[in-house]
């Protein structure tokens, strides 16, 4: 391979991504029931162009090696666990990225069967590729768009 991608430093395990997303859903549910929030939350997440380009290059290359046509990135909300390990990010909202696509064979079959409406047209999360996290969070006072 001419220019193999470096493995991005912001990758997380699928298990940690699930923890982040479960925490987000719990926090969102708590807000709906009127439970108080201890501190102001992040309201923006920033990734550098370099980090995003690196991740895209990585997932496209690894996707091909794993037999996938990577066609996009799904953005998930998460909340860091409330523990010392996560420092000032503990309990804060985050955003993590998960590559999407289809197995290369399935994509080729879909092209051949394009005259048939396929229900499985939506891209799926690619389970074999690591999600990306650790963007810079907007800190209180909140950023204003």
Image: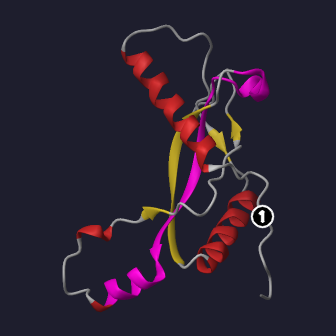
Quadrant housing residue 28: top left
Is 96 colored magenta in this rendering? yes
Q: Is residue 76 above or below residue 30?
A: below
Q: Is mark 1 on a helix, strand or loop?
A: loop
Quadrant housing residue 34: top left
Q: How many labels does the image show?
A: 1
Indicate left or right for 121 with 140 as reference: left
Q: Is residue 70 visible?
A: yes
Q: Is residue 88 above or below residue 38?
A: below
At x 40%, y 88%, the residue is 108
The magenta stretch is 83-111
Of 89 and 62, the residue lying toward us: 62
Residue 74 screen position, x and y as percent: 49, 55
Q: Is residue 62 above or below residue 140?
A: below
Quarter placement of the N terminus? bottom right
Find disc 1 in the rendering and name its residue. 7
Residue 56 screen position, x and y as percent: 65, 67
Residue 49 screen position, x and y as percent: 71, 59
Quarter placement of the C terminus? top right
């Amino acid at each position: 391979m001419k220019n193999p991608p470096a493995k991005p430093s912001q990758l997380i395990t699928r298990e940690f991504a699930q923890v982040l997303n479960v925490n987000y859903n719990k926090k969102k549910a708590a807000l709906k029931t009127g439970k108080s929030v201890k501190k102001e939350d992040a309201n923006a997440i920033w990734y550098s162009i370099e980090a995003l380009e690196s991740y895209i290059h990585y997932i496209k290359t690894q996707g091909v090696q794993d037999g996938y046509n990577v066609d996009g990135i799904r953005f998930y909300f998460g909340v860091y666990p409330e523990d010392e390990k996560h420092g000032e990010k503990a309990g804060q909202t985050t955003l993590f990225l998960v590559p999407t696509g289809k197995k290369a064979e399935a994509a080729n079959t879909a092209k051949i069967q394009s005259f048939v409406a396929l229900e499985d047209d939506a891209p799926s999360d690619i389970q074999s590729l690591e999600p990306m996290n650790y963007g810079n969070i907007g800190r209180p006072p909140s950023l204003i768009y």
